Amino acid sequence: MLKNSKFPIGIFDSGVGGTSIWKEIHQLLPFENIIYLSDSKNAPYGNKNKDAIIDLSIKNTEFLLEQNCKIIVVACNTATTNAIKVLREKYNIPFIGIEPAIKPAALQTKTNTIGILATKGTLNSELFEKTSNSINKNIERVEIIGKGLVELIENGKLYSNEMTTLLSSYILPLIEKKVDSLVLGCTHYPYLIPQIRKIIGNKIKIIDSGEAVAKQTKNILVKHQIINIEKRNSVHHFYINKSKKTLEMLVSKDDKNIKIFERDF
Ligand code: DGL
């Protein structure tokens, strides 16, 4: 079932973090209309079990399909690593997922030690284990569960003392462990890059998958001949099932092509 090229791209995340992916996609594909679903009411997904993550991912997909989305970007590492296989089996539409970029990190590390900051749900998933087993065995992985980070970001506490303290407790030990590359395995975390830099300076390279996901989205649109060839300003609708305050902070609410709706779903 191929869809009309003018239909929107659908993006979902457990919350506002996937807007880091929306920004990359919008930058690369400025003429694509986008519908973004922020399931903030159910965030964080990272502490939930696989079945619960699958059920929520199905609910989000159904919402985006009702809006006629031609392709769905799962802008959540936790949902991708736990649910994308089920989504691809269940729906006849292309899905793009996001996984922690441990392969590029493994190729770049000089100390043979990489850090991965991600949710418990991502680090414990079968897909993450499979990808981990596929990289060079000599590379040591230091895995850190970013417990509490998503909640602080969802509550707009990006620049709070609480955030600095929590983040420091996760990333300062990486220096002693000789980590030279840190993979951000959650789409909320790119918003923490300025704070991470404040804590550890430029000692560690930070790697995230946002740009790669945008490129992959473009490739799939081209492959299925559903890229929007109309060169008009695109429209962006954001749906959130909690207060839109943090979302407004992260996306420019003054842009007349951006609309944010609070709605229960
Ligand atoms: N942005 C989600 C991710 O990439 C956050 C997960 C969560 O809600 O715990 O994994």
Image (tube, rainbow, N blue to C red):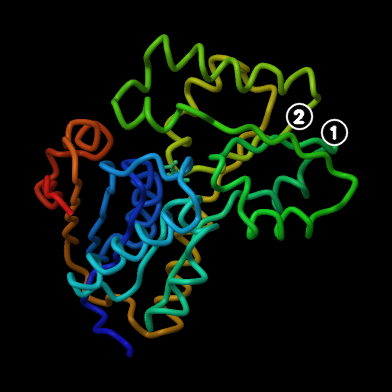
Q: Which mark is residue 136?
A: none
Q: In which quarter of the image is residue 53?
A: bottom left
Q: Quadrant of residue 172?
A: top right
Is the C terminus in the top left, top right, bottom left or bottom right quadrant?
bottom left
For the point 35% across and 57% down, the residue is: 56
Q: What residue type is labelled 1?
A: Thr
44 vs 249, left or right, is right
**Image-quarter location of ligand 1:** top left
In this view, the residue farthest toward the right is 138
Residue 157 x, y percent position in the rendering: 33, 21
Residue 57 x, y percent position in the rendering: 37, 60
Asked whether the beta carbons under mark 1 and mark 2 sit within 8 Å of each other, the answer is yes
Q: Residue 179 carries which label?
A: 2
Residue 115 lies, with reference to residue 68, above or below; the image says above
Q: Nearer the viewer, residue 259 or 55?
A: 55
Classed neighbour count for the residue bearing mark 2: other residues with Cα under 10 Å, few (<14), some (14–19), many (≥20): many
Residue 69 lies, with reference to residue 157, above or below; the image says below
For the point 19% across and 39% down, the residue is: 242
For the point 52% across and 58% down, the residue is: 82
Q: Which mark is residue 111?
A: 1
Q: What residue type is labelled 2?
A: Val
